Amino acid sequence: MKINLKDLAKELGISVSTVSKALRDSYEIGEETKKRVLAKATELGYTPNPYAGFLRNNKSKTIAIVVPELTNNYFIQAISGAEEIAQENNYHLLIYTTNDSFEKEKSIIKHLMNGRVDGVLLSVSSTTSSYEHLNELTQNGVPIIFFDRICHEIETAKITTNDFACGFIATEHLIKNGCRDIAYLSVSEYLSIDSKRKQGYLEALNKYDIKIEESRIINCGIDDKMNTQKIKKLLSSNKIPDGIFASVERLALKVYHICNAANISIPESVKVISFSNLRTADLLCPSLTTITQPAYEMGKEAAKILFKHLSKRKNIILNENIVINSVLTIRNSTKKTS
């Protein structure tokens, strides 16, 4: 059986990162620990990957950006921002999409190990429920920067927007425009962005003494047919909500399609607001009111931080939480009606 770093670490009762540094004769590791690691490696017949070591030492001049989807305009703009910084640093940018699949995300991360890239910019999939694959990547010397959809459990830099505040602002905007029965379309139980946006929604309802109805929180996911069924049920009940806050743009567009098919008028019967970077939001009928994220700037900032650490040859990046504010862009989908 082939012995890897993880096996060595388990035998020695120390971290994979410590084993890796000891084998590379890092100044961060004491001499006694190095001797123990080398002795155990010899005993178990561990053979390092010379190709991976070569790439780590000489740099691949390539970074990767891993996103859940390309149908969401936020990620297209974030990629453009990251690409600008990569080009300035004479690096190539590899683009990977997980299709919001945890299994595909794990497969991509595994592919990026062993020096294929010098660093990774990552927005986790909505189905990611554990982070061992990400820990393993960092332990193999590949730094990760999170943006938008982040992982709190891993110590590194994280680029986000003010999701809680904007969840509050979006809901308050609907309330001020006459809504008293507001539904929230959730995208995933696992994502921090969804949790914070929902918390903002609930806080606004509390502030304006509007009773919180659990039935008005619709838990959507990656199954388009299931999402359609849930939103259809919401909009075909005896008492439809007078406002809908969609956590992501694809759910808002689903609402538009269903309302159009059912002859439900926006904004007369139901007002709609969404987090969205849809460039054609003002061309929809009616134009869509959005919480517009600084996607391009978030992609740039994530890449800048990664290159700052790559220039210092640091694989371990300490926690750093950077928040870039989104803005409310008011259009006709939330317009007051008589």
Image: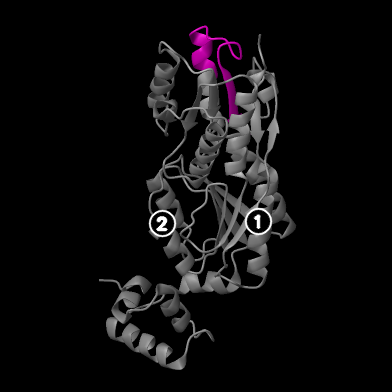
Q: Is residue 69 magenta?
A: no
Query: The magenta stretch spans which residues?
Result: 256-277
| Disc 2 secondary structure class | loop
Q: Residues within 10 Å of mark 1 (few under 14, many from 20)?
A: many
Residue type pointed to by label 1 = Ala
Q: Position of residue 300 (x, y in %)?
A: 69, 51
Closer to the chain start, of discs 2 and 1, is 2
Cα separation between marks 2 and 1: 22 Å
Q: Position of residue 119 (x, y in %)?
A: 57, 61
Q: Position of residue 330 (x, y in %)?
A: 70, 26
Q: Which residue is mark 1?
A: 303
Q: Nearer the viewer, residue 114 or 195?
A: 195
- In which image quadrant can residue 309 be found? bottom right
Residue drawn at point x = 45 percent, y = 92 percent? 31
> Image quadrant for the N terminus?
bottom left
Q: Disc 2 or disc 1, which is closer to the eye?
A: 2
Q: Is residue 264 magenta?
A: yes
Q: Which residue is mark 2?
A: 131
Residue type pointed to by label 2 = Tyr
Q: Is residue 186 above or below residue 321?
A: above
Q: Position of residue 296 (x, y in %)?
A: 69, 44
Q: Nearer the viewer, residue 138 or 235?
A: 235
- In which image quadrant can residue 325 be found? top right
- Coloured how? one colour
Specify whether residue 276 is in view: no
Left or right: 293 in relation to 254? right
